[in-house]
Image (cartoon, rainbow, N blue to C red):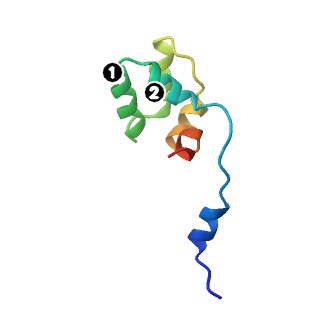
Amino acid sequence: MTSNLSTHLRDQRRPRKGPPCSISLIVAALGDDDRRALLDALDDPSVSSSTIWRALRANGIEVALTTIQRHRRKECLCDSLR
């Protein structure tokens, strides 16, 4: 019997449970211009996670560098909900 690896692995995924991703909460709370700037930076590999982290902190937004990195790698709850 032949199995399809991708189907098998997809069917084995469990939905992630837990609090919303901090980045999604930050994005939702920003005004339009800041939201677009943050989303563009997150999607741009030439902008480092450290640069994003420093910009957020400079604007009074506390978030861990690892949270930004995890979000960019699509390892957070945002990605599991897509």
Residue 14 percent coordinates (x, y): 68, 53
Residue 4 percent coordinates (x, y): 58, 77
Q: Is residue 3 above or below residue 65?
A: below
Mark 2 vs 1, N-terminal side: 1
User: In the image shown, does 73 or 30 lie closer to the viewer?
Assistant: 30
Image quarter for residue 65?
top right
Of all residues, the one furthest to the left in this rendering is 33
Residue at the image position 34 percent from the left and 26 percent from the top: 37
Disc marking residue 53 = none
Residue 61 percent coordinates (x, y): 52, 16
Q: Amino acid at mark 2?
A: Ile
Q: Is residue 16 above or below residue 34?
A: below
Please say whether residue 74 is visible from this viewpoint. no
Residue 24 percent coordinates (x, y): 51, 30
Q: Amino acid at mark 1?
A: Asp
Residue at the image position 60 percent from the left and 26 percent from the top: 64
Residue at the image position 47 percent from the left and 19 percent from the top: 56
The residue that disc 1 covers is: 32
Residue at the image position 67 percent from the left and 62 percent from the top: 12
Of all residues, the one furthest to the bottom in this rendering is 1
- At mark 2, the secondary structure is helix
Categorize mark 2 by other alpha carbons within 10 Å: few (<14), some (14-19), many (20+). Answer: some
Categorize mark 1 by other alpha carbons within 10 Å: few (<14), some (14-19), many (20+). Answer: few
CA gap, disc 2 to disc 1?
Answer: 17 Å
